[in-house]
Amino acid sequence: MSIAKRNNVQVAGSGPATMVFAHGFGCDQNMWRRIAPAYARRFRTVLFDLTGSGNSDLSAYDRSKYDRLDGHAADVVEIVQEFAQGPVIFVGHSVSAMIGLLANLRAPECFAAQVMVGPSPCYINDGEYVGGFDRKDIDGLLDTLEANYLGWASNMAPAIMGAPEQPELAQELTNSFCRTDPEIAQHFARVTFLSDNRADLPRLQVPTLILQCSDDIIAPRTVGEFMRRTLPRATLAIIENFGHCPHLSAPGASADAIDGFLAANGF
């Protein structure tokens, strides 16, 4: 099976470097539509759907391979090696920020920088670490998701999206969740919300932008501060926005933060 078909890879633009955009849980590459086209004017851009999401080839979803985020990271390395040109800036939203980190650690020669939008290396509180959720909260979330996925999607999407002044975005996220195969979504949710990549953070040696919203129920500011302290070459940018998807609800502020980071690092 071709990588292009497996991950519905779409390439646009041209330039001396490549920006690779990766979406979060329950979403697809269309979630980048408000910022990615502008970057195609000066970069090569690569968009794709994680295996099991969007218009990827669902038959390629192997539960044993994707039982850890590293399975998706292996796919990212293959995508980068086949479709990127020049230095690669990986832009990952939510769980894909950690997928990008793991891909970078797998093949450090392939990546020049990381942009992490709403990242979290661990969602569960642990001692002094505040991830935002107790373990019982995550277990309850996963139980609800597995018992009634469509109901969970309808209830959670507005809270995750935020942006109450743009209700169409919450509806879009609900629709995206509902298009996802429920069995795959349930499996990917368990892998996502029980992952812990805190020990991997100090190993990432490329410049990294942590882009966070001022109010995010999925990745609170304590997580961003922890990552800023733990990543060797991190910059933390907080934009005034409510929700977990600033690339959709606040694309201008998101692009400004990304542009500042790119300029500061010679891109």
Image (cartoon, grey):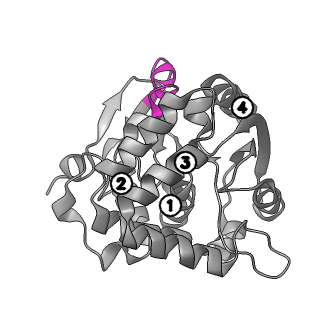
- Point 20% across, 63% down: residue: 60
Residue 220, quarter of picture: bottom right
Q: Is residue 112 visible?
A: no
Task: Check disc 1 and give the amino acid type.
Answer: Ile
Per the rendered image, the range of residues in magenta is: 32-44
Residue 211: horizontal and vertical position, in percent? 70, 43
Q: Secondary structure at mark 4?
A: helix
Q: Is residue 39 magenta?
A: yes
| Residue carrying label 1 | 99
Identify residue type, mark 2: Leu
Q: Nearer the viewer, residue 14 or 69?
A: 69
Residue identifier under label 4: 257
* Residue 93: mark: 3
Give the CA separation, mark 4 to mark 1.
21 Å
C-alpha gap between disc 1 and disc 3: 9 Å
**Spatial separation of the CA atoms under disc 3 and disc 2:** 12 Å
Residue at horizontal 16 percent and vertical 63 percent from the top:
59
Q: Are marks 2 and 1 in contact (CB under 8 Å)?
A: yes
* Mark 3 vs mark 4: in front: 3
Name the residue type under label 4: Ala
Q: Are marks 4 and 1 in contact (CB under 8 Å)?
A: no
Q: Residues within 10 Å of mark 1 (few under 14, many from 20)?
A: many
Kind of element beneath mark 2: loop
Of mark 1 and mark 3, the one earlier in the sequence is 3
Which quadrant is the N terminus positioned in? bottom left
Instruction: Decide if residue 1 is on the left or right side of residue 63.
Output: left
- Which residue is labeled 2 in the image? 50
Residue occupying the point 35% across, 44% down: 48
Of the numbered discs 2 and 1, the one sitting upstream in the chain is: 2
Residue type at mark 3 is His
